[in-house]
Image (cartoon, grey):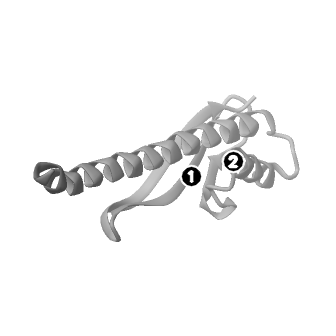
Amino acid sequence: MVEFVLVLPILMLVLFAIIQFGLTFTHYVALTDAVRAGARTAATSRLSATRDADIKSKVTSSSDGLIPASAVQVTSTWVHGTDVAVKATVPYSIGLLGLVIASGNLSSTTTERVE
């Protein structure tokens, strides 16, 4: 019983660290998938009058609200055959018991050819 009481706090810290890392990794996967969906929309909407708004809307809706439209950047010349790059950056923070262990920005960029 004494060993269990001594080891339990360490095991709980490891468990909480694994959960926090898993949540951060899940956010990164969602970010990458949303940026990919936005880049595909960008590649096929060269002639649209509202293409930037459509791209940002696609990224935001694909991420289930994780990415605000203000965090999305679209870079292209919009000439047929050139590249369009969609980039999004969101902050993250990994904390254990109220202490921030790691923080920074998750960023993902996807490039596709303009059709």
Q: How dense is the environment of label 1, judged by Cα within 10 Å: few (below 14), some, or many (20 and up)?
A: many
Q: Quadrant of residue 31?
A: top right
Q: In the rendered structure, find residue 59 and report the number of the disc placed on it.
A: 2
In this view of the protein, can residue 4 be seen by the observer? Answer: yes
Toward the viewer: 47 or 88? 88
Q: Quadrant of residue 68?
A: bottom right
Q: In the rendered structure, find residue 29 and report the number of the disc placed on it.
A: none
| Residue at the spot of label 1 | 88
x 69%, y 42%: residue: 38
x 34%, y 45%: residue: 18
Type of amino acid under label 1: Ala
For this view, does 82 lie left or right of residue 6?
Answer: right
For this view, does 31 lie left or right of residue 46?
Answer: left
Secondary element under disc 1, as helix, strand or loop, is: strand
Question: Residue 113's x, y, as percent?
Answer: 65, 30
Question: Residue 84's x, y, as percent?
Answer: 64, 39
Q: How dense is the environment of label 2, judged by Cα within 10 Å: few (below 14), some, or many (20 and up)?
A: many
Question: Residue 11's x, y, as percent?
Answer: 24, 49
Toward the viewer: 46 or 92? 92
Q: Mark 1 or mark 2: name the one nearer the start of the chain.
A: 2
Type of amino acid under label 2: Val
In this view of the protein, can residue 79 be seen by the observer? Answer: no
Disc 1 to disc 2: CB gap under 8 Å: yes
Question: Residue 81's x, y, as percent?
Answer: 69, 28
Toward the viewer: 106 or 78? 106
x 40%, y 48%: residue: 19
Q: Farthest residue toward the front?
A: 1
For this view, does 84 lie left or right of residue 26?
Answer: right
- Residue 39 position (above or below residue 21): above
Secondary element under disc 2, as helix, strand or loop, is: helix
x 40%, y 52%: residue: 20
